[in-house]
């Protein structure tokens, strides 16, 4: 027989995966980290090794025969964590669904199953590779049998085993019997370690021979230990011996990998919420039918919110499964007219644009795909390179015919992240009105903690489809091309599929948006806001590049000066960017106290340096150096490069579907973290300039989160302080320090401010103690005093956690929900994180909702009054208008 026989130790990798990946759960609170790590390991091993035969060895459900020999076997192992135990039932089903044989024999450990299968493989003449990191299995290595540890990417052959144990593989069990194994509670001979055991076995060959010639052991102490623990040694030899005669029913011929069970995988991975794995492992693409009738989006009705009308009225079309029709390429005048007539007659369409860039301001329109019904999909090429004129229409002609339809509010548009398409179309002379349903925003409202709201991910989860990927049509690496170089037929297939899948998703997600109560939030807040954000992105913001270049040179001079000062204070030069070298200077040379330890050594992060700063100049100077370097690298050097050549301004992207609390974020570049403190921060902010004849007006909510907290908690004391216009931090300081307002010092106010905002995030006394440099007991007394005075806040926070635990989610005043499966976790650390999110979501999410409403109302007012002003930036609770 030819090929290779791969025998995988399942238990080894389940436990390794559990400890390597933490905090992963599905939306129902079921831990999934161990299963996820195990599956990815299985897939990688099978892909890399491409074995002809595979067996996955499983431990027995009950105890093994070794427990009968020695009841204390493995007795010192800690109990299996509850969140690991709840994952065990999924290991065997997922293994079988992947087409791999799961071999379990009650009464025998996985190691015995592996040993027996390895012997059978040898006899059949198939090279065997044992996949494990378990040292006990190294005794199997020999002719035709190797061992591979994928976690360490290490292959164990005879020479490698001999180097580790000092003896060849066939004598590993003898060494293990003498040295014992604390993890399995194998006693061994007390006082003799690995080196001593190897030396004895090299001299005597076996445990039995050793005891037959015990008088020849030269060292009296070793001989005495052997005599005293003779019974332990003999027992240990039996415990570590692997059984090679396990009654395994499966014949080797039955261990050939089978086809994956797509239905079982879809069911398991959907429950476990392994979305990427589900997408990657789904066979084929959307061309394959999955059976059944598929409900699709039909006429979407009027734009206004009508509580009595369904959001997405569904028409079920019997299609035998979601199979996309052939995409009609629109490249002639009569075809363009037919598309326009179809859009008007149908009254709605899914629209998707294809461009040369992911940044809409710089993107050149290449094509537009339209889906008016599940059986009618179109692609309109307008910007492909290298095609004859007959193969595509001019952009001007497409704008003339489709422009009025895209601008008509009555013809309702469906899109995925339609803000991007809107910007692209605006920049190419189209007006766009009538957004009916954005699948990205709908997915975000339904599950804000979801890993991905991409069309690929949503299609895999809700439609059971694997869509063609962008890389598949544009290639990657040195062979990658821009979309305008993709042949029209391939572009049509890819783009049309996106528009078609978006239309199908609109019905699936629309029914849930209605049934789960998110209709008004989607139609009255999120979708209108996406249009406001599009205008802000299109407007951009101007910067003074020359001022930033001057600032960059100043920062560079300061960095060089700080570097010299650090070297002088340290008494040695070193690489400031190397955490390892910095740690050696701080802890070895300067003898400063070591803090938290990482995988690569002792940490030198900001929190560690802040604790060490009062003790020595080096950590203080390092903090200053890092701060200046960040300002230089993030702002002074980078921002001028990001100025658009077309507009002369910087255009950020505002993200609605990222933060689980409902807050907006900003990227490419991130303009929400522009520094505001200190002279350096002010200098960078001064580099943002208004247009000629214009100025900036910044409108900022004062302590909005604390005001939301006061409202939600109905706390009389907190509400009274705000109504009186008091400095809330000074008021809190007076309460917790029990002094008159006139006696409040800046340090007292700083502690009170930390508590005021920290309470929202579930801050502990330990964290307050560490951040403020005060004793733990004092920190705890401050928090106790806070809750005693603001009793309404205390009651609200307790109720927020209790209610979230009952409902499985936390919500804001606008009924924006954040699912909290972490609250059901058996892991205390994960559960604590869920409790902090339950506290934070109503407050931070409520504040985010209020700011979004403010943006919508301000945008309406600016338009209504025709003011020469426009919103440019949103920085959490601050709006910047030009």
Image (spheres, grey):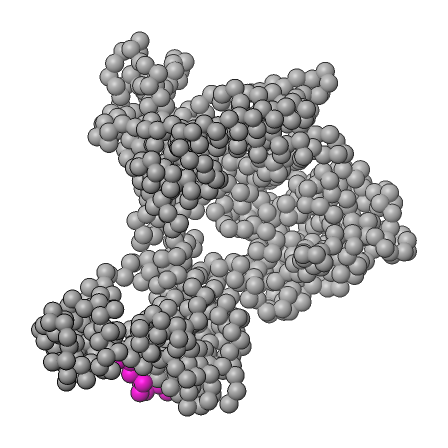
Residue located at (34% from left, 52% from top):
825
Is 413 displayed left or right of 809 in the figure? right
Q: Which residues are magenta?
A: 239-250
The location of residue 276, given as percent across then percent down, is 53, 59
Q: Does the stretch in magenta take in 247?
A: yes
Residue located at (61% from left, 65% from top):
293
Is 649 displayed left or right of 712 in the figure? right
Q: Quadrant of residue 175?
A: bottom left
As drawn, which residue projects farthest toward the top?
742
Which of these two is toward me, 719 or 738? 738
| Figure disc tally | 0
Is 328 displayed left or right of 176 in the figure? right
The location of residue 726, given as percent across then percent down, is 38, 14
Check the picture and name the quadrant holding the C terminus.
top right
Q: Quadrant of residue 294?
A: bottom right
Residue located at (11% from left, 69% from top):
221
The location of residue 142, given as percent across then percent down, is 39, 82
Q: Quadrant of residue 674?
A: top right
Which of these two is toward me, 544 or 380? 544
The location of residue 776, given as percent across then percent down, is 24, 32
Q: Does the stretch in magenta take in 346?
A: no
Q: Is residue 73 visible?
A: no
Prevailing SS of the magenta stretch: loop
Residue located at (22% from left, 72% from top):
197
Which of these two is toward me, 7 or 335? 7
């Amino acid at each position: 027989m030819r090929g290779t026989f791969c025998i995988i130790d399942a238990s080894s990798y389940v436990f390794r995966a559990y400890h390597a990946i933490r905090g992963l759960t599905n939306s129902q609170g079921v831990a999934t980290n161990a299963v996820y790590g195990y599956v990815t390991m299985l897939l990688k091993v099978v892909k890399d090794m491409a074995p002809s035969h595979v067996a996955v060895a499983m431990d027995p459900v009950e105890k093994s025969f070794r427990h009968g020999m020695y009841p204390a076997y493995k007795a010192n192992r800690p109990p299996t964590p509850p969140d690991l135990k709840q994952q065990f039932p999924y290991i065997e089903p997922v293994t079988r669904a992947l087409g791999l044989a799961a071999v379990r024999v009650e009464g025998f450990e996985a190691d015995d199953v592996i040993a027996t299968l390895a012997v059978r493989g040898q006899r059949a003449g198939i090279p065997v590779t044992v996949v494990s990191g378990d040292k006990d299995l190294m005794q199997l290595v020999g002719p035709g049998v190797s061992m591979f540890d994928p976690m360490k990417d290490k292959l164990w052959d005879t020479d490698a085993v001999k180097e580790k144990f000092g003896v060849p593989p066939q004598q590993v069990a003898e060494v293990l019997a003498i040295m014992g194994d604390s993890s399995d509670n194998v006693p061994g001979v007390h006082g003799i370690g690995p080196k001593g055991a190897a030396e004895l076995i090299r001299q005597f060959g076996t445990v039995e021979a050793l005891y037959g010639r015990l008088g020849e052991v030269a060292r009296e102490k070793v001989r005495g230990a052997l005599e005293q623990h003779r019974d332990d040694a003999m027992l240990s030899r039996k415990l570590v011996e692997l059984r090679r005669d396990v009654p395994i029913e499966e014949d080797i011929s039955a261990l050939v990998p089978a086809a994956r069970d797509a239905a079982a995988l879809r069911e398991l991975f959907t429950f476990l919420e392994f979305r990427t794995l589900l997408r990657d492992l789904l066979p084929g693409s959307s061309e394959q039918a999955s059976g059944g009738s598929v409900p699709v989006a039909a006429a979407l009705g009027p734009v206004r919110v009508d509580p009595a009308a369904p959001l997405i009225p569904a028409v079920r079309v019997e299609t035998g499964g979601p199979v996309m029709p052939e995409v009609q390429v629109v490249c002639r005048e009569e075809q363009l007219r037919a598309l326009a007539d179809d859009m008007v007659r149908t009254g709605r369409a899914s629209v998707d644009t294809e461009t040369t860039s992911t940044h809409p301001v710089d993107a050149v329109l290449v094509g537009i795909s339209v889906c008016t019904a599940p059986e009618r999909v179109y692609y309109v090429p307008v910007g492909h390179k290298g095609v004859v004129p007959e193969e595509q229409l001019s952009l001007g002609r497409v704008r003339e015919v489709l422009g009025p339809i895209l601008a008509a509010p009555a013809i309702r548009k469906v899109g995925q992240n339609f803000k991007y398409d809107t910007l692209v179309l605006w920049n190419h002379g189209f007006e766009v009105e009538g957004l009916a349903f954005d699948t990205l925003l709908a997915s975000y409202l339904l599950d804000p903690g979801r890993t991905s709201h991409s069309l690929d991910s949503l299609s895999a989860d809700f439609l059971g489809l694997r869509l063609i990927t962008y890389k598949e049509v544009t290639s990657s690496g040195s062979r990658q091309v821009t979309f305008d170089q993709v042949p029209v037929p391939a572009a049509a297939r890819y783009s049309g599929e996106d528009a078609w899948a978006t239309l199908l998703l609109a019905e699936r997600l629309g029914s849930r948006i209605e049934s789960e109560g998110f209709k008004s939030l989607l139609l009255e807040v999120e979708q209108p806001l996406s249009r406001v954000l599009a205008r802000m992105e299109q407007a951009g913001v101007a910067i003074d590049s020359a001022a930033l270049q001057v600032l960059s040179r100043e920062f560079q001079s300061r960095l060089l000066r700080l570097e010299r000062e650090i070297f002088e204070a340290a008494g040695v030069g070193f690489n400031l960017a190397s955490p390892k070298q910095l740690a050696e200077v701080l802890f070895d040379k300067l003898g400063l106290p070591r803090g938290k330890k990482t995988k690569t050594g002792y940490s030198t992060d900001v929190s560690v340096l802040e604790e060490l700063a009062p003790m020595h100049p080096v950590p203080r100077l390092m903090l200053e150096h890092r701060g200046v370097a960040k300002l230089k690298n993030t702002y002074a050097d980078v921002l001028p490069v990001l100025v658009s050549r077309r507009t002369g301004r910087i255009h950020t992207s505002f993200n609605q579907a990222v933060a689980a609390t409902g807050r907006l974020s900003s990227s490419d570049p991130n303009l929400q973290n522009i520094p505001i403190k200190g002279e350096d921060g002010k200098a960078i902010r001064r580099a943002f300039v208004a247009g000629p004849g214009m100025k900036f007006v910044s409108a900022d909510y004062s302590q909005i989160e604390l005001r939301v907290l006061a409202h939600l908690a109905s706390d009389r004391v907190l509400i009274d302080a705000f109504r009186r216009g008091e400095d809330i931090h000074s008021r809190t300081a007076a309460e917790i320090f029990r002094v008159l307002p006139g006696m409040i010092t800046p340090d007292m106010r700083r502690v009170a401010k930390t508590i005021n905002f920290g309470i929202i995030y579930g801050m502990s006394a330990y964290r307050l103690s560490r951040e403020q440099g005060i004793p733990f007991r004092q920190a705890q007394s401050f928090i106790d005093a806070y809750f005693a005075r603001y009793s309404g806040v205390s009651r609200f926070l307790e109720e927020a956690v209790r209610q979230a635990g009952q409902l499985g989610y936390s919500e804001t005043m606008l009924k924006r929900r954040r699912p909290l499966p972490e609250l059901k976790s058996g892991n205390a650390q994960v559960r604590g994180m869920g409790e902090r999110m339950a506290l934070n979501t109503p407050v931070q999410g409520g504040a985010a909702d209020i700011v979004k409403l403010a943006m919508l109302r301000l945008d309406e007012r600016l338009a209504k009054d025709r003011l020469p002003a426009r919103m440019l930036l949103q920085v959490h609770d601050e709006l910047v208008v030009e």
